[in-house]
Every structure is written in C-alpha cells, then in structure tokens.
C-alpha cells in the first residue's frame, strides 16, 4: 500500500472544480443557516403552544387533476399574559388537538410573527457542513498529483 504518481485529466479537473464550488456553497449555506437560527434565538421569544383547532383546505393538483386536502393547525400560546392564536403552515397531515409545539415570536407583534419551531432546526447546518465537507474532500482527491494504491502497480 503506497502512493503512486497520477496525472489528472481535464475531465477530472473540471469535475473537481465543480465539486469544490458545490462543496463551498454547502459549507457557506451551513454558516448562513446557523447564523439565521442563532439570530432568531437571540432576538425572538420562545414558548410552548397548544394545537386548539385545525383548518382544512382542498386544492386541485395541476399534474393529475386530483383534489388534495391539506391541514393547518390553529395554535394558541401566551404572550404578555394574553392568549394569542395563529395559524400554522399547511401540511398533508392533521395535528391532533392538545398537541404541544414550540412557538417562536417577536414580543412586539406576537400574533403576526409567530411560527412553529421545527424540532430538527439545529441539525440543518450540520447536515450542510457534512455534505459540503464530503464534496470538498472528494474534489480535492481528484486533483491531487498522487493516488493511493493497494497494489505495487501504478
């Protein structure tokens, strides 16, 4: 097992450059998402809300002309000692009444700025860092002037 000299072709160099760009975009996107989440955590207030109702909507799918029903939870939480309600985002499933969710909102305008906090929000930047790092490592391996060889033959 040793390193053998290797000459990169134009196709390998081009794919390495594309991979480096993609990797850098993922790593940069990971930093951006991490900063957005950190800013929200620092400036917005977080509390627990309760699903009190559900709103349904029927939409016609343009590709196969079928009707699709979606549901949005109505969530109630306490802001400044007052009960505040807002409608969450529409999903393909209905949330059960009484479910507890984390809500993030601006204390100055709780009714208009409230949103449900995604439980996997903190993992998103790490996933982007991992995919970007992997793309960077694979791309750099394509342009290195040596290759790892398990046999004694080049």
Image (cartoon, rainbow, N blue to C red):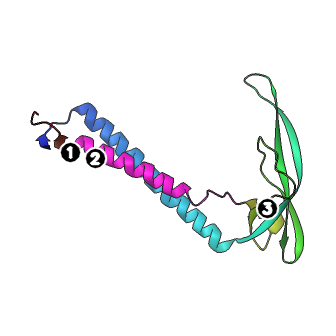
Is residue 34 shown above or below 71? below
Q: CA distance from mark 1 to mark 3?
A: 52 Å
Does residue 121 show up?
yes
- The residue tagged with tag 3: helix, strand or loop? strand
Q: Residue at x 54, y 62 (%)?
A: 34
Q: Residue at x 77, y 50 (%)?
A: 89
> Magenta stretch containing residue 33, yes or no?
no
Of tags 2 and 3, the one toward the viewer is 3
Give x and y (percent) for residue 48.
77, 67
- The residue tagged with tag 1: helix, strand or loop? loop
Q: Residues within 10 Å of mark 2 (few under 14, many from 20)?
A: some
Whether pointer 2 and pointer 1 mark residues with C-beta atoms closer than 8 Å, the reply is yes
Where on the picture, by quarter, is residue 5?
Answer: top left
- Give the mark nearest the N terminus, 1 or 3: 3
Q: CA distance from mark 2 to mark 1?
A: 6 Å
Between 97 and 54, the residue placed more toward the observer is 97
Q: Which residue is mark 1?
A: 144
Q: Residue at x 88, y 47 (%)?
A: 55
Q: Residue furthest top?
A: 64
Q: Residue at x 26, y 44 (%)?
A: 141
Give x and y (percent) for residue 30.
49, 56
On the rendered image, what quadrant is the C terminus found in?
A: top left
Between 47 and 150, the residue placed more toward the observer is 150
Q: Which residue is mark 3?
A: 100
Tell whether 86 sits left or right of 151. Answer: right
Q: Which residue is mark 2?
A: 140
Between 69 and 38, the residue placed more toward the observer is 69
> Magenta stretch containing residue 128, yes or no?
yes
- What range of the chain is rendered magenta? 117-143
Q: Residues within 10 Å of mark 3 (few under 14, many from 20)?
A: some
Q: Main secondary structure of the magenta part?
A: helix
């Amino acid at each position: 097992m040793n390193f053998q000299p290797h000459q990169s072709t134009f196709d390998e160099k081009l794919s390495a450059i594309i991979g480096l760009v993609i990797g850098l975009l993922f790593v940069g996107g990971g930093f951006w998402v991490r900063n957005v989440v950190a800013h929200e955590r620092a400036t917005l207030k977080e509390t627990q809300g309760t699903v009190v109702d559900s709103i349904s909507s029927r939409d016609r799918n343009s590709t196969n002309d079928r009707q699709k029903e979606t549901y949005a939870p109505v969530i109630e939480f306490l802001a400044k000692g007052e009960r505040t309600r807002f409608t969450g985002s529409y999903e393909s499933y209905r949330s059960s009444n009484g479910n507890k969710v984390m809500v993030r909102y601006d204390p100055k305008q709780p009714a208009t700025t409230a949103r449900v906090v995604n439980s996997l929000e903190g993992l998103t930047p790490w996933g982007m860092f991992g995919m970007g790092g992997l793309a960077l490592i694979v791309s750099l391996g394509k342009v290195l002037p040596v290759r790892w060889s398990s046999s004694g033959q080049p």
